[in-house]
Image: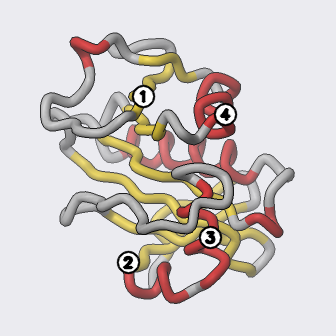
Amino acid sequence: MSTWARGLGISLVASDPSSVLADASLHRALADGIEHAHEGPLHEFPTGAEWYVIREGGADVGVAILERDAPKTGEASLWAVAIAPEHRGRATATKAILVIERRLKRDGIRPVIARVPRTNGRGLYFMLRVGYTPLPTEETPVNETGDVTWFARGGRT
């Protein structure tokens, strides 16, 4: 696995769905991203999505899933930033978003939009706290299905 991005004391390391889902803590983090203590199946992620393990202090503490050139060429959709329960409370998700944005900007991709299920109240509040605002319905991806809110930093440009 290779480091895709680093900064602010964290690293994002390229991974794959089977490796991430085999880790019980990371699986729990993704399930909590649907709703607290969710026990059902996880959401399906796009087949072309990139999976990254978030590392802090040498430990795998979370996962980030993104899709490039979606919904439009030159943009990216952030499908998940999820931190394992035992590693929460240290601003790791905020740091991960900042590192992701910086790396994608360097790669010529802007803006980043983020998808949050409406059943994830903590996730909805988190996106507001890190400076993202909900997108108007007419600006959400056309192929979107499900009860979700899409966010962009300060609105979409």
Residue 39, given in percent of the width and then of the height, sits at: 56, 67
What SS does tag 1 mark?
A: strand
The earlier-in-sequence mark between 2 and 4 is: 2
Q: Quadrant of the N terminus?
A: bottom left
Q: Residue at x 42, y 13 (%)?
A: 155
Query: For the residue marked with disc 4, what is the amino acid?
Result: Phe
Query: For the residue marked with disc 1, what is the amino acid?
Result: Thr
Q: Is residue 89 above or below residue 76?
A: below
Q: Which residue is mark 4?
A: 126
How many numbered discs sit on the rendered protein?
4
Label for residue 149?
1
Q: Which residue is mark 2?
A: 17
**Circles 4 and 3: CB atoms closer than 8 Å:** no
Q: CA distance from mark 2 to mark 1?
A: 23 Å
Graded by Cα atoms within 10 Å as few (under 14), some (14 to 19) or many (20 or more), the crowding at tag 2 reads: some
Query: For the residue marked with disc 2, what is the amino acid?
Result: Pro
Q: CA distance from mark 4 to mark 1?
A: 12 Å
Q: Residue at x 85, y 51 (%)?
A: 89
Q: Residue at x 67, y 77 (%)?
A: 25
The earlier-in-sequence mark between 3 and 2 is: 2
The earlier-in-sequence mark between 1 and 3 is: 3
Q: Residue at x 64, y 35 (%)?
A: 121
Residue 96, given in percent of the width and then of the height, sits at: 61, 51
The earlier-in-sequence mark between 2 and 1 is: 2
Q: CA distance from mark 2 to mark 4?
A: 24 Å
**Circles 1 and 3: CB atoms closer than 8 Å:** no
